[in-house]
Image: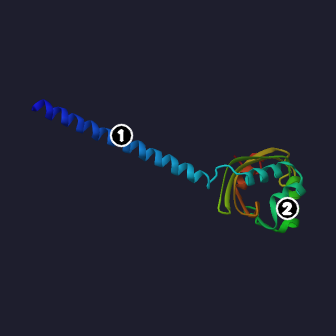
């Protein structure tokens, strides 16, 4: 009788272990499926951000503004410049290219969801007009933006101007 009890309890314990193992695997499967479902709506890299960065890298103000809606509101927060509409934005972009030579913008990361997005970027250039040093600089920045009809309709750029000033020698390191 003891052997039957041992065998029965052994089978019972095996079932419990299998049930626990199955539960753990089921929970992991649900987690993976829920994460993959989230990834269909939340992107870590986005074609809107990639198009905007490519437009800036064209060094052509007319091409750059095509990433934005006609009624865009574009704000360069550190310089307190707000551009309303593509015409003002084009003027701002042309000024950036005149002020900073050899501009190269790198998209580090981006996220777009439900008409809102964030881009982390690195701006590299040579100071031509702002401090007139001719020296290269690198600025890390962040854009917070809104999207409408596949284009950026509002953009607020944040970056540290002091970093640029230190790079070109306008501030001590």
**In the image as oriented, which residue stretches furthest toward the top?**
3
Residue 171 visible to the viewer:
no
**How many other residues sit within 10 Å of disc 1, few (<14), some (14-19) or many (≥20)?**
few
Frontmost residue, 134 versus 117: 117
**In the image as oriented, which residue stretches furthest toward the left?**
1
Name the residue at 74% across, 62% down.
Answer: 155
Q: What percent of the width, then of the height, locates residue 94?
A: 89, 57
Which coloring applies here? Answer: rainbow
Q: Which mark is residue 21?
A: 1
Q: What percent of the width, then of the height, locates residue 79?
A: 76, 62
Q: Is residue 120 above or below residue 12?
A: below
Per the image, label 2 sits on a secondary structure element best described as: helix
Name the residue at 45% across, 44% down.
Answer: 28
How far, Cα to Cα, is label 2 from label 1? 61 Å
Q: What percent of the width, then of the height, locates residue 100?
A: 84, 50
Apparent side of residue 41 relative to residue 31 in the rendered image (left or right): right
Residue 116 visible to the viewer:
yes
Q: Is residue 42 above or below residue 10?
A: below
Q: What percent of the width, then of the height, locates residue 41?
A: 62, 56
**How many other residues sit within 10 Å of disc 2, few (<14), some (14-19) or many (≥20)?**
some
Frontmost residue, 104 versus 66: 66
Report which quarter residue 149 is drawn in: bottom right
Q: Closer to the N terminus: mark 2 or mark 1?
A: 1
Q: Which mark is residue 92?
A: 2
Frontmost residue, 15 versus 122: 15
Name the residue at 42% across, 45% down.
Answer: 26
Report which quarter residue 18 is drawn in: top left
Per the image, label 1 sits on a secondary structure element best described as: helix
Frontmost residue, 126 versus 27: 27
Q: Which mark is residue 51?
A: none
Q: Nearer the viewer, mark 2 or mark 1?
A: 1
């Amino acid at each position: 009788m003891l052997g039957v009890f041992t065998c029965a309890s052994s089978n019972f314990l095996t079932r419990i272990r299998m049930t626990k193992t199955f539960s753990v695997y089921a929970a992991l499967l649900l987690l993976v499926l829920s994460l993959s479902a989230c990834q269909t709506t939340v992107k870590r890299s986005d074609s809107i951000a990639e198009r905007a960065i490519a437009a800036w890298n064209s060094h052509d103000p007319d091409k750059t503004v095509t990433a934005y809606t006609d009624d865009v509101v574009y704000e360069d927060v550190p310089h307190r410049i707000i551009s309303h509409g593509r015409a003002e934005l084009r003027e701002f972009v042309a000024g950036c290219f005149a002020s900073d030579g050899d501009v190269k913008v790198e998209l580090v990361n981006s996220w777009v969801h439900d008409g809102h997005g964030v881009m982390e970027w690195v701006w590299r250039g040579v100071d031509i007009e702002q401090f007139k040093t001719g020296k290269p600089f690198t600025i890390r920045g962040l854009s917070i933006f809104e999207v409408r009809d596949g284009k950026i309709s509002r953009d607020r750029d944040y970056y540290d101007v002091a970093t640029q000033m230190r790079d070109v020698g306008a501030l001590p390191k």
